[in-house]
Image: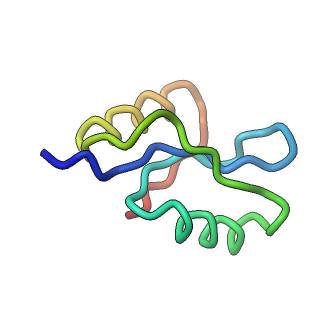
Amino acid sequence: MARDTNKCHFKQDHEFVNTGVTNDLKRREAEQWWNFGEDGHIVQVGRATTMDAALEWEREQAAKGRSTRRRS
């Protein structure tokens, strides 16, 4: 399996406002600017991984109460 999926948080100030997975961090950041405003930024979590592993991480984040929305 290809390790081409990134785990990330979108932060504004010191808060995570969205958590998810993507194969394109720049595009994901632009999408989040559209949703939350341009005063935030993407923070990559760890190294690129497989889609299955990234989705499992995303489920774990949701269980912890972090806002998630799947984007490609």
Return the x and y of residue 10 as percentages of the image width and height.
66, 50
Return the x and y of residue 47 as percentages of the image width and height.
42, 37
Return the x and y of residue 37 as percentages of the image width and height.
80, 68
Q: Residue at x 34, y 50 (%)?
A: 5
Specify the quadrant that holds the N terminus: top left
* 17 vs 44, nearest the viewer: 44
Q: With respect to residue 51, does 28 lie above or below?
A: below
* Residue 3 figure quarter: top left
Instruction: Indicate left or right for 53 with 14 as reference.
Output: left
Instruction: Indicate left or right for 56 with 62 as reference.
Output: left
Q: With respect to residue 62, does 21 lie above or below?
A: below
Count of picture labels:
0
* 52 vs 23, nearest the viewer: 23
Q: Which residue is drawn at 48% across and 27% down?
A: 63
Q: Which residue is drawn at 44% across and 64% down?
A: 24
* Residue 28 figure quarter: bottom right
Q: With respect to residue 59, does 28 lie above or below?
A: below
Return the x and y of residue 6 as percentages of the image width and height.
42, 48
Q: Which residue is drawn at 85% across and 61% down?
A: 39
